[in-house]
Amino acid sequence: MNRAVPPAGGKRSDKPDDIDQPFAGDLLQRTRLADRLTGYINRLENGTVIAIDALWGEGKTWFASNWAARLYREGYPVVFIDAFAENDELDPFFILAAELALLFEDGQGTGDAIRGEAARLMNAMMPLAGKPAAARAVPPAPPDAPFETTGDDMVNRIEKRLKAWPAEKALFTRFRTTLGRIVSGCGKPAVIVIDELDRCRPSFAIRFLERIRHYFDMPNLIFVLPVNRIQLYEAIRNVYGTDTDAGTCLHRFIDFFLSLPRFASNDTAHLAHIRSFIGDMFSRHRADTGTPKRKRFIELMTAWAALVPLTLSEIERAVTLYVLAGEPPEQGIATFLIVLKIKKPEWIAPLLKNDRKILAAILDDFLSKIITDSQKLPMAPDRYFIALQNFFNSEKSSHMQDRQVITQFQTDVLDPNSFYIESLEEISYLIRMVAGNLDLDIPA
């Protein structure tokens, strides 16, 4: 029996042993959610569609692949489908039927039984999938053929399909009966994880949901969809119209949504998990975390990640930018610029030109909220954020050479033993220098 499970990075794999220890290094304690879900699917009498909702970059693929790997090791039939990697010219029914045939392949014809019933049903249903398919089924008429001839031919074909409708309904019943018998004989629910559905072309994503609900809704068959709910709402509106109630419509296809657990930004455990995750990213880059500069970067990035907030993939990008720069100077400036590059890349070039509109935006739309929230953090470097705020406020107000602002920036933002700063212009020069070291956008 084939069970396809992806490795920890979330890429497609047909080897179930790619994850040696499911949920190893579970910094966000998502094993608990896996335990709850496993208990839930064991109690289900009917099939169901479960959506695991989280923003892009929050670790949906990591959770789903690790849960799938653990289910496999516990004897569940499991298949993992990367919907975004599939050929979206194929009907999702074909993809699902093909994967299930592989999943239940036993050398005794079970997989072939699924393929046979699926092929007969597809042969009947494909011409009815829409005008393009129906049009392709009709040979093109000669250029000089009268319009009525082509129309009559189409009418005849449609009439034949109408007469064949009872037989086609019987094919639908036979397919579901055959698959249902095979699935029910597993003993444990079969789990089909469909990842990256929210990244697919809207029509393909919605067709996937339609096919699941119409053809594969049966006892013992569990579909798990790691998705960003907002993106699926947009797909619904794109396909069914902008005035569609996307929430109500989506619940016709998905039985319930479950959010990945998140900690409050001021939760001590959450901060510890972020710090550990950043350390793990350094380890993946084979970079030591014991140097004073990197310790400072980790401290500041932990606070930024909690307050902005940053997703796990954004934190990974931040560490990668830092490592690629070869440990840049001035950790306080570098960390700020890296966060800005990830969250507001369009602000970098105007910032380095001292564009007052961008300086105001950084103050009002970025730093003000962070400073308010930072006061709730048990480890927040409040003086660091306030020093940044005061500097940008001075820059916005025409370079008033406030000695207190300069001294505060020297003490709370710059690295220890940094050279002495005497003006706001020198701080601006330092920011440009660090941006160059990080290979960010430097204005001409």
Image (cartoon, rainbow, N blue to C red):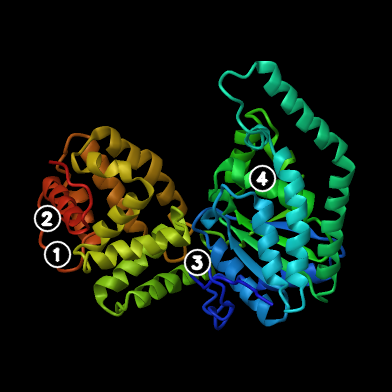
- Amino acid carrying label 3: it is Lys
Circles 1 and 3, Cβ within 8 Å, touching? The answer is: no
Q: In this view, does 150 lie above or below 278?
A: above
Kindly identify the residue that appears in the image at 81 percent across and 75 percent down.
186
- Amino acid carrying label 2: it is Ile
Q: Can residue 254 be seen in this view?
A: no
Calculate the distance from the C-alpha at mark 1 to the C-alpha at mark 3.
Answer: 44 Å
Residue placed under numbered mark 1 in the picture:
418
Give the numbered dot on residue 207: 4
- Tell me if mark 4 has few (under 14), some (14-19) or many (20+) residues whose alpha carbon lies within 10 angstroms of its own: some
Marks 3 and 4, the one that precedes in the sequence:
3
Residue placed under numbered mark 2 in the picture:
421
Q: In this view, does 157 lie above or below 107?
A: above
**Quadrant assignment, res 153:** top right
Circles 2 and 4, Cβ within 8 Å, touching? The answer is: no
Circles 1 and 2, Cβ within 8 Å, touching? The answer is: yes
Kindly identify the residue that appears in the image at 73 percent across and 56 percent down.
119
Q: Position of residue 437 (x, y in %)?
A: 18, 59
Residue placed under numbered mark 3 in the picture:
11
Circles 1 and 4, Cβ within 8 Å, touching? The answer is: no
Marks 2 and 4, the one that precedes in the sequence:
4
Side (left or right) of 422 relative to 293: left
| Mark 3 residue element | loop
Q: In this view, does 345 lie above or below 52?
A: above
From the image, state whether disc 3 or disc 4 is nearer to you.
Answer: 4
Calculate the distance from the C-alpha at mark 3 to the C-alpha at mark 2.
Answer: 49 Å
Q: Position of residue 36 (x, y in %)?
A: 73, 70
- Amino acid carrying label 4: it is Arg
| Mark 4 residue element | helix
In the image, 87 versus 199, the foreground residue is 87
Q: Where is residue 163 in the image (x, y as percent from the top left)?
A: 87, 36
Calculate the distance from the C-alpha at mark 1 to the C-alpha at mark 4.
Answer: 59 Å
